Image (cartoon, rainbow, N blue to C red):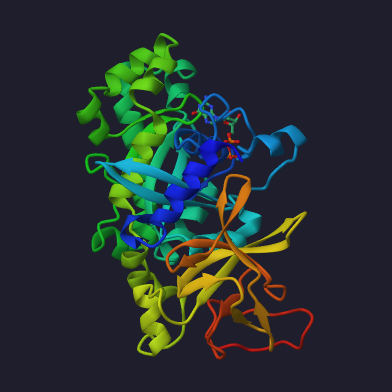
């Protein structure tokens, strides 16, 4: 792997046991609103792939060897580091399928994250799948922030006037807020999840041209809507991307406004897990305790030509390491953990251990399917009821 990649691994592993510095996020959007372009851009900005390549590549294949071999990668997750105010944060980005057909997958991916960046095309506005993903997020107690994408199109294709730009953007925010309020008045009113540009929970930009602004970023950089308009109009978005880079503006918002796993699990476990919150393991889940039993939920199974099946998911409690025996929900057997790894672009990088609050890629869990819970607790209440086709249907409480 390139040196750049190696350094990144050290930075990532150094942050894994500091949950207050972790953000587990998903990007979700109606199809074509720019989720893929945005994901690539964030990776480029975090030094995982070169900025020039970001956006041109179809996915997160930063490893040169993989590129040379022309392997198409279905990267499920990626870890990256972002600095805010002199402090480094670990951002685990989990791929959330954006299509309605994959409703179940969206739910599982949402279960692994604590916050969501909802992407909405500035020209199209909210669409049916925007509603679907937003509903899933709110149901899972996942806090949303908003990224209004393709703002360049408002200016260069729709040719709206400068004065109309903030009005148009405000309309998109209003629509999203209406949805949030209708779906969950409680989150909207009580938790303060109303999207508010002034607070910084809304960013505006262009994933394709790699720039973004938010009200806080405008104050810091002096690049406001007027400047954005002029840069776009004059076709000089390269300079705009240097002065107000998308990855930096958006990841600042992620760090400031989306919860860390400690805050999130306290609030989310009562909603996503049906076990006894007062039990020992219930308390460990609520506090993301890394020192006791392991509770791991599988959100995706990948096939690796060398390692075979890789179970990717969220570790809610305990610390994963090679050699551990885990009970897999819905089966009567245990599976031995063969390796634990983090995802860095296309690469899985094996590490010694992964503590609670992180996303892990695990080999050896041969009985696990998407949705399985792997735990050191024999009678662990799983995160969802699972029917294994190879066995008689088991009812799990
Ligand atoms: P996804 O389906 O949500 O993953 O969307 P993609 O990232 O594949 O983007 C869909 C299309 O919109 C592609 O042709 C992108 O190049 C284009 N696109 C994405 N972001 C922007 C943007 O900020 N401005 C413009 N003009 N086009 C964009």
The residue under the point 55% across, 71% down is 321
Q: Nearer the viewer, residue 18 or 52?
A: 18
The residue under the point 34% across, 13% down is 230
Answer above or below: position of 146 versus 180. Answer: above
Q: Nearer the viewer, residue 394 or 22?
A: 22
Q: Whole-percent x and y of residue 199? A: 23, 43
Q: Whole-percent x and y of residue 395? A: 63, 89
* Left or right position of 294 against 143: right
Q: Quadrant of ligand 1?
A: top right
Q: Quadrant of the C terminus?
A: bottom right
Answer above or below: position of 96 versus 170. Answer: below
The residue under the point 53% across, 43% down is 6
* Left or right position of 112 against 180: right
Q: Quadrant of residue 382?
A: bottom right
Answer above or below: position of 12 versus 167. Answer: below
Q: Nearer the viewer, residue 385 or 308?
A: 308
- On the question of residue 23 being in view, the answer is no
Q: Whole-percent x and y of residue 392? A: 76, 88
- On the question of residue 46 being in view, the answer is yes
The residue under the point 23% across, 36% down is 216
Q: Whole-percent x and y of residue 315? A: 49, 69
Q: Given the current orientation, which residue lies at the most extreme left position?
A: 219
Q: Given the current orientation, which residue lies at the most extreme top position?
A: 234
* Left or right position of 59 against 279: right
* Left or right position of 224 against 49: left
């Amino acid at each position: 792997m390139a040196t750049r990649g190696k350094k990144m691994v050290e930075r990532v592993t150094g942050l894994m046991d500091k949950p207050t510095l972790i953000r587990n996020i998903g990007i979700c959007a109606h199809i074509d609103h720019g989720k893929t372009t945005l994901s690539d851009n964030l990776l480029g900005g975090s030094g995982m792939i070169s900025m020039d390549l970001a956006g041109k590549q179809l996915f997160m294949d930063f490893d040169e060897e993989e590129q040379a071999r022309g392997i198409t990668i279905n990267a499920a997750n990626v870890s990256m580091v972002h600095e805010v105010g002199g402090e480094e944060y670990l951002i685990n980005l989990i791929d959330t399928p954006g299509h309605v057909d994959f409703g179940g997958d969206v739910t599982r991916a949402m279960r692994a994250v604590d916050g969501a960046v909802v992407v909405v095309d500035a020209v199209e506005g909210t669409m049916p799948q925007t509603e679907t993903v937003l509903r899933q997020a709110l149901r899972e107690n996942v806090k949303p922030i908003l990224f209004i994408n393709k703002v360049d199109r408002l200016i260069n294709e729709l040719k709206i006037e400068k004065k109309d730009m903030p009005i148009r953007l405000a309309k998109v925010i209003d629509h999203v807020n209406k949805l949030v309020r209708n779906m969950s008045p409680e989150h909207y009113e009580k938790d303060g999840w109303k999207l508010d540009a002034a607070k910084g929970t809304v960013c505006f930009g262009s994933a394709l041209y790699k720039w973004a602004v938010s009200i806080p970023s405008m104050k810091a950089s002096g690049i406001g809507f007027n400047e954005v308009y002029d840069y776009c109009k004059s076709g000089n978005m390269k300079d705009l991307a240097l002065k107000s880079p998308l990855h930096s503006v958006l990841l600042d918002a992620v760090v400031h406004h989306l919860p860390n796993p400690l805050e999130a699990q306290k609030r989310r476990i009562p909603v996503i897990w049906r076990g006894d919150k007062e039990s020992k393991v219930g308390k460990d889940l609520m506090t993301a305790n890394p020192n006791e039993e392991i509770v791991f939920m599988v959100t995706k199974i990948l096939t690796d030509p060398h390692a075979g099946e890789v179970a990717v998911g969220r570790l809610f409690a305990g610390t994963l390491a090679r050699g551990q025996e885990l009970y897999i929900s819905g089966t009567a057997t245990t599976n031995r953990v063969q390796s634990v790894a983090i995802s860095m672009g296309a690469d899985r990088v094996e590490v010694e251990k992964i503590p609670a609050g992180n996303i892990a890629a695990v080999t050896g869990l041969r009985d696990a399917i998407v949705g399985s819970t792997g735990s050191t607790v024999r009678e662990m209440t799983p995160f969802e009821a699972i029917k294994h086709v190879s066995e008689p249907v088991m009812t799990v409480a």
